[in-house]
Amino acid sequence: MSGRGGEHGQRALPRRAAWAGRRPPADELLERYSDREPEPFVSFERRGEADGTARTEVTLTHELLPASGVRVMVSPGTLPTTAAGDLRRIADMIENDRRLLSERYWRRGDEDRSRGPAGQAPNSSS
């Protein structure tokens, strides 16, 4: 079921058919992706460091995923509190520096984007 419910507009969880099934081979995924055009995405990734700290990497990348205004990917097995906390920190970054979602910001050369949010330099990769 995909109806709305709960006081925060939560949706029922989708069926786990994709998770329960086999993992598709890489060549099958590549064949499926080969029909798509690369779409630009601003990627926010929270990475844990060996010293127990975490940092957020902000990059412009191109992916062979269907276009979507917002996409969140969380690795299975991630603690819900960790995922929610990291999403809150990313939301704070976006609210504090709205340029991060600007096409014009990412079109400028790296020399014009010398410092990203909280002193981190955004990267551009494909």
Image (cartoon, rainbow, N blue to C red):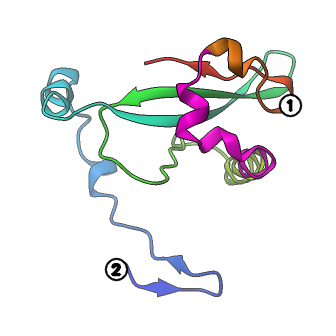
Q: Secondary structure at mark 1?
A: helix
Q: In the image, is 112 to the left or to the right of 31?
A: right
Tally the marks: 2
Q: In the image, is 33 to the left or to the right of 100?
A: left
Residue type indicated by callout 1: Ala
Q: Examine the image and state in which quarter residue 3 appears.
A: bottom left
Q: Which residues are magenta?
A: 90-109
Mark 1 or 2, nearer chain start: 2
Looking at the rendered image, the quarter that the C terminus falls into is top left
Looking at the rendered image, the quarter that the N terminus falls into is bottom left
Nearer the observer, 110 or 81: 110
Nearer the observer, 61 or 114: 114
**Which circle marks residue 62 in the picture?**
none
Q: In the image, is 108 to the left or to the right of 25?
A: right
Measure the C-alpha gap from mark 1 to mark 2: 41 Å
Nearer the observer, 101 or 33: 101
Q: Secondary structure at mark 2?
A: loop
Circle 2 is placed at which residue position? Answer: 1
Circle 1 is placed at which residue position? Answer: 118
Residue that appears at 47% across and 37% down: 41
Rendered location of residue 44, percent (x, y)? 62, 36
Q: Examine the image and state in which quarter residue 47 appears.
A: top right
Identify the residue at the far top of this view: 111
Residue type indicated by callout 2: Met
Rendered location of residue 87, percent (x, y)? 69, 50
Rendered location of residue 33, percent (x, y)? 20, 31
